[in-house]
Image (tube, helix red, strand yellow):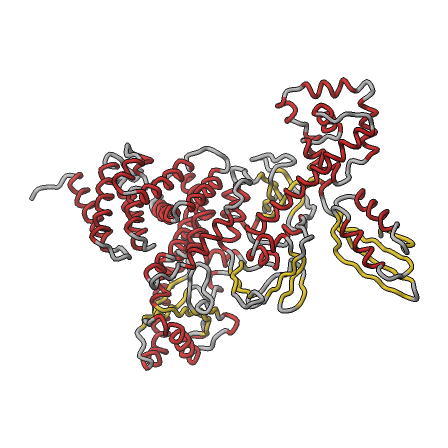
Amino acid sequence: MAVLSIEDKENQELSRRYKELLRISYQTLSKADKQLIREAFNLAVDAHRDQRRKSGEPYVYHPIAVAKIVASEIGMDATSIAAALLHDVVEDTAVTLSDIERMFGKTVAIIVDGLTKISHLSKEKEISTQAENFRKMLLTLNEDIRVIIIKIADRLHNMQTMESMPPEKQVKIASETLYIYAPLAHRIGLYNIKNELEDLGLKYTEPEVYYDIYDKIEETKEERTAYIEDFKNIIKTALDKEDLKYVIKGRHKSIYSIRKKMLGNVSFDEIYDKFAIRIIYESDRKSEKFYAWKIYSIVTDYFRPNPIRLRDWISSPKSTGYEALHITVVGPKGKWVEVQIRSQRMDEIAEKGYAAHYKYKNGEETEIGIETWLKRLQETLENPSGNAVDFVEEFKLNLYAKEIFVFTPKGDLKSLPKGATPLDFAFSIHTNIGLTTRGARVNGKLVPLNHELKSGDQLEIITSPSQKPNANWLDYVITARARSKIKNALKEDNKNIAERGKELLDRKLRHLKIKMDEKVVNELVMFFKLKTSFDLFYRVGIGIIENQKLKDFAAQKSNSFINYFKNKIRKSQSEAVDTTKEEVSSNYDLIVFGKNEEKLNYKVANCCNPIPGDEVFGFVTVSEGIKVHKKDCPNAISMQSNYSYRVIQAKWIDSSQREFKATITITGIDNIGLVNDVTKVISSNMHVNMQSVSFESDNGLFNGKVIVIVRNNTILKRLIEKLKKINGIDKVQRI
């Protein structure tokens, strides 16, 4: 018998893998589909012929494995399978994008091009590579969502085959996976892949923890199987009477999710829902809901349910398309167990994500779920110019957030992340509604804008054309869309203030016999220890730089110190930008933490040495308290991925732009329209927000108390002076 050469063995293996790829495909493949896949397979084999992976096996095994994940686990079409087979050929071989388009058409070429761009990005050496990589990957959605789906499959296979990589690379790739790819798989509805990515991420970032939990799960495997049989035997007769076709399965929680629960000081043995029982039944589309509740009724006849643990994802599916009934019951031997009830269609959607929706589409019915998801992604991408790490953090807020369902005044259902507020709701309806929100009614009652919404709430947004966003609103919202719109509006508002400030400065300087030109503006920037002319104009606009300070400048300009300024101005641009730490600190002189902007003790991290003005975050260490890191610190991704519970918001602030609360008391003689006059002065006075107002009248005299939010003492003094001029006002004081 002839001994096969290594090449012959590998060719036999390739043939076997090709046949398996066609066999396990979730979609029904036409003759044209099979021809497309065959041609892509042949080109991939030929292009990668001389390449090997670090494990020593032929490189082409990798794109074939990615194609199998795309075909079977995600359930995509022939175009996706072909693109998966070809996803590395342009990057790693002599085949060009033009060759791909000529041989396989424009769609396959667009997908391969998107995957090639992402691959190029991952080789860049920037500090925030992963964040930039992720943002630019999402931008490919403008062309084809399949780019991201294939990239997730590519990442899954890389995670499954990392044994031969050096440990430091394993940790890096695993951290990135936990940071970006697992949340994205979750959002697309690929729960199986999300769980596997998380488990593999934990395996390489915390191997001891992973194997400890893995061993404990294996130890209880027989016990778990016996428990499912006990459960099944108790309800089998009742289910069979209903003439149902069903299967009952058991599945343990992912190792990663068990780890998350254990981080909350719960031991492995104390986690009562370490596995779930699934009842999957056959049904036509019309009868699905009826049978789901029928099975629910049977299960709860035999096992006592926990009423607060009922989750009806059939009446209100998750935005990922997930549908099921979840109940937690006291099962055999008095143990709590989660029971998931879903039809075969629901089960396929849970396993395959959006791909399964295509299989069940009726005629011209639009794919609402995937369109809604794409719309949300596009909204997040509307303002992609900011810091990339910020972008990813805000995007992740929406990826992993649990959902609530609220109603519009007309009874339409809206899905929002858990923790959302009326402002989030307003911006989800329309940008202009969000920007002009003055108040909100929840279930008929007025609530503050930072009120946390609950499922079932009915909302009515009260708007006013004169309303503008303020910086506090950023603390009132959790959705990326709302934050992006508010930040843009605040930037525009500051720009308008600076423009008014520039005009005001010109008038004031003319009064001091000084002509405002570029030279004078640079001298003023130096004099007030600012960084840019924008900072100067803005401060004039909000009243920080008063007439007396400008007079001091004029006096100093005319004396012998003028040479000092001339020398400063003559310096090169690079020296001008390189201001001293004291000058920067005069503007960015305070680090505050959390939403409430608390002052806490901290140390600056040596790994990235943040300086005043840098984008930063706080990291709680065990022995050294809070350490402050730059947001693009080399260690940021690792910390954010593995120890997100230790990360706290932090920022340098310019104390001149902080907003302060002040209480003003007003006394005087009561007359008709006085309260209206007071509120009109406050609301029309620039940069003042009224938080609360109360008046009491007694025998013709009145006492009032007003709480306002102002940027500085100068504005407050100006407001008090204006209030004193109102007819009938006797005294105005700040408490």
Instruction: In this rendered view, identify the residue nearer to me: 544 or 700.
Output: 700
Quick check: 376 above or below 388?
Answer: below
Across and down, in percent, residue 134 comes to 46, 43
Closer-to-camera residue (381/52):
381
Residue 343 visible in this rendered orientation of the protein: yes
Q: Is residue 359 above or below residue 236?
A: above
Q: Is residue 298 left or right of residue 644?
A: left
Can residue 209 be spotted in the picture? Answer: no
**Quadrant housing the N terminus:** top left
Q: Position of residue 37 (x, y in %)?
A: 24, 47
Residue lying farthest left?
1
490 displayed left or right of 148: right
| Closer to the camera in the image, 114 or 520 | 520
Q: Nearer the viewer, residue 126 or 387?
A: 387
x 43%, y 74%: residue: 331
Identify the image quadrant of residue 104: top left
Determine the residue positioned at 33% across, 35% down: 91
Instruction: From the viewer's perspective, tell me whether residue 201 is left or right of residue 598.
Output: left
